[in-house]
Image (tube, grey):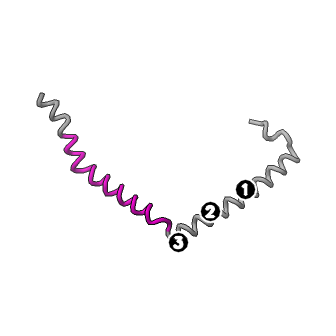
Amino acid sequence: MQSITALIVIPLALFLIFVAPIWLFLHYRSQRQVSQGLSDEEYKELTALGEQAEAMAVRISTLESILDAEAPEWRNKS
């Protein structure tokens, strides 16, 4: 009976002493960062990525139209 209790108590104690405090610290730090919103730099990066995505969508559309004209069966190839 003592060995079964030790198998439960020792890992639980190690978890509560080492893992739980680090886990809580990281959790609340990430929650604080999320609640603060985007910084100016992050907002600029996000805007730039959005513009790049729009430009890529136009390029892909153009490439697809060229392929449709030159090789109509290109979509059916695996």
Q: Secondary structure at mark 2?
A: helix
Q: Which residue is mark 3?
A: 40
Q: Name the amino acid, label 2.
A: Leu
Q: Nearer the viewer, mark 3 or mark 2?
A: 3
User: Quadrant of the image for the C terminus?
Assistant: top right
In the rendered image, residue 40, in percent from the top left (x then y), is placed at 52, 72
- Few, some or many residues within 10 Å of mark 1 (<14, 14–19, 20+): few
User: Quadrant of the image for the N terminus?
Assistant: top left
Give the camera-side residue of 69 and 23: 23
| Left-right relation of 9 to 20 | left
Above/below status of 9 relative to 47 = above
Q: Which callout, 1 or 3, points at the residue further toward the start of the chain?
A: 3
Q: Which residue is mark 2?
A: 49
Q: Which callout, 3 or 2, points at the residue further toward the start of the chain?
A: 3
Give the camera-side residue of 32 and 64: 32
Q: Secondary structure at mark 1?
A: helix
| Left-right relation of 76 to 49 | right
> What main secondary structure does the magenta stretch of the protein show?
helix
Q: Quadrant of residue 48?
A: bottom right
Marking on residue 46: none
Above/below status of 17 relative to 33 = above
| Left-right relation of 23 to 59 | left
Q: Name the amino acid, label 1.
A: Ala
Please give the name of the residue rendered at 35% of the width and 58% of the height, measured from the top-left corner.
28
Q: CA distance from mark 1 to mark 2?
A: 12 Å
Above/below status of 51 relative to 15 = below
Per the rendered image, the range of residues in magenta is: 10-38
Q: Name the amino acid, label 3.
A: Asp
